[in-house]
Image (cartoon, rainbow, N blue to C red):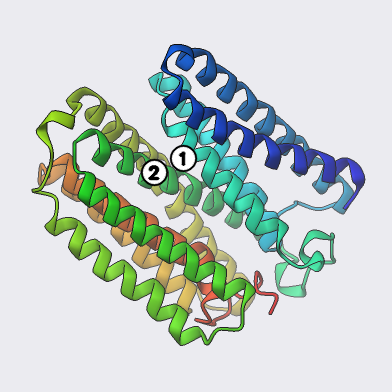
Amino acid sequence: MSDFQLALTNTAGISSVMSFWVFVASNGLRGKKELLLKIASGVLIVGFLSLTIAIVARGVEAQRFPLSNLYESLLWFAWATMGGYLWIARAYGIKQLGWLASLTAATFFLYGSWLPSSQHEIQPLVPALVSYWRQIHVPPLIVSYAMLFLSGLAALLQLFAAGRRKTLAVAVTTIVLAVSAIGLGTFTEIAVHWLQLLFVGSSLVGVVVAFKLLNQFDASKVNAKLAETYDDVSYRCIAIGFPLLTIGIITGGLWANHAWGSYWSWDPKESMALVTWLGYAAYIHLRIHRDMKPEKLAVVAVVGLLLTLLTYLGFNSLGFGGLHSYGQFK
C-alpha cells in the first residue's frame, strides 16, 4: 500500500471518528446544535471523498478492480455507508442518523485496521477470483449490505422516536453481542461453536424479547412525526438494498456456473444470502400487504440487519466454512 493511499484511508477513518463525536456533541449542546450538525456532516463528506480517492488509488496501484479480500470489502462497505447516509440526509433533511452511520463506518475502519498486514498489502488474486464476474457480482452485494445496514440503524431510531425504549435497549444489546461474536471470531482462538452460539443464540432470544416488549412504551416520549420519517427512511434503504442484493445473488449464480459448472451448490454463504433475501422479501410483503405497524416492521428490519451481518462477515469469522472463504485469513 502506498503512503498516499494510506494517508487517504487514515483521513477517512479519522473523519468518521471525528464526525461521530461532533454528532454526539450536537445532542448535548442544544444552542449550537445546527452548527455542530453541519460541521459533523462536513467532516463526514471529507471522509467520504478521501475514501473514494483511496479506493481509486488502490485500484490504480493494483492494476485491477480493488475488491478482492476482506480488507478491501470493508473499505467499500464503509464508503457505501457514508455515501448512503449523506444521500439520506440530503433527501430527508435529517441528521441524527449520522452518528450511527459514522459510528458504523468507524467501527469497520477499526476492524479493518486490526487485520493482518497481508490483508492491507496488495496481493495477486487467487485463481478463483481472476474473472470479470468479480466486479459484476461483488460491488452490488457490498453496497446492498451497507444500505440494508442503514435500514436497521434507521429502525433503531424509529423505535426511539416511537417511545419503545425497552425494545430499543434489547435490540441494541443483541446487535452488540452479534458484533462481539464476529470480533472474537476474527481476532481470538475461541472455539467457533461457542461464538456461533453467542451470535445465533443472542439473536434469537433478543428478537423474541424485542417483539414481546413492543407494547410497553412511554406515550410522553413519542414523536410521531419523527418516527414516521425514520420508518420511511428504513423502507427506502431496503428499497435500494433489496434489488442490489437480488442482482448480487443472480450474478453470483452466473459466476458459479461459469467457474464450477453449477448455478447453485447450497454453499453455506449462498444459503445464508438466500435466507437474508427471504427476510427482506418478508419485510416488503408485510409492509405492503399486511399493513403491519411501523414498530413491528422496525424489529423486522433489525432482524434483517443481523442476517446481513451474518451473511457478510459471520461466515468468514464464525467457522461456518464453505467455498466462499476468500475473506478468511486464519
Category of crowding for the residue at label 1, using alpha-carbon neighbours closer than 10 angstroms: few (below 14), some (14–19), many (at least 20): some
**Could you say where residue 107 lies in the image, as x and y percent from the top left?**
58, 51
Could you say whether the residue bearing mark 2 is in a helix, strand or loop? Answer: helix
Q: In which quarter of the image is residue 92?
A: top left
Category of crowding for the residue at label 2, using alpha-carbon neighbours closer than 10 angstroms: few (below 14), some (14–19), many (at least 20): many
Residue furthest right in the image: 3
Q: Residue 4 carries which label?
A: none
Q: Nearer the viewer, residue 82 or 261?
A: 82
Give the amino acid at mark 2. Leu
**Could you say where residue 70 lies in the image, as x and y percent from the top left?**
66, 63
Could you say whether the residue bearing mark 1 is in a helix, strand or loop? Answer: helix
Which residue corresponds to the image point at 39% horizontal and 39% vertical from the top-left? 237
Q: Check the image and report above or below for 273 versus 97.
A: below
Evaluate whether residue 80 shows in this view. Answer: yes
Q: Quadrant of residue 175?
A: bottom left
Q: Earlier in the sequence, mark 2 or mark 1?
A: 1
Which residue corresponds to the image point at 61% horizontal and 83% vertical from the top-left? 189
Q: Do the residues labelled 2 and 1 touch (CB within 8 Å)?
A: yes
Which residue corresponds to the image point at 70% horizontal and 62% vertical from the top-left? 114
Q: Nearer the viewer, residue 190 or 120?
A: 190
Q: Name the residue under label 1.
A: 100
**Could you say where residue 216 lies in the image, as x and y percent from the top left?**
10, 47
Q: Residue 153 carries which label?
A: 2
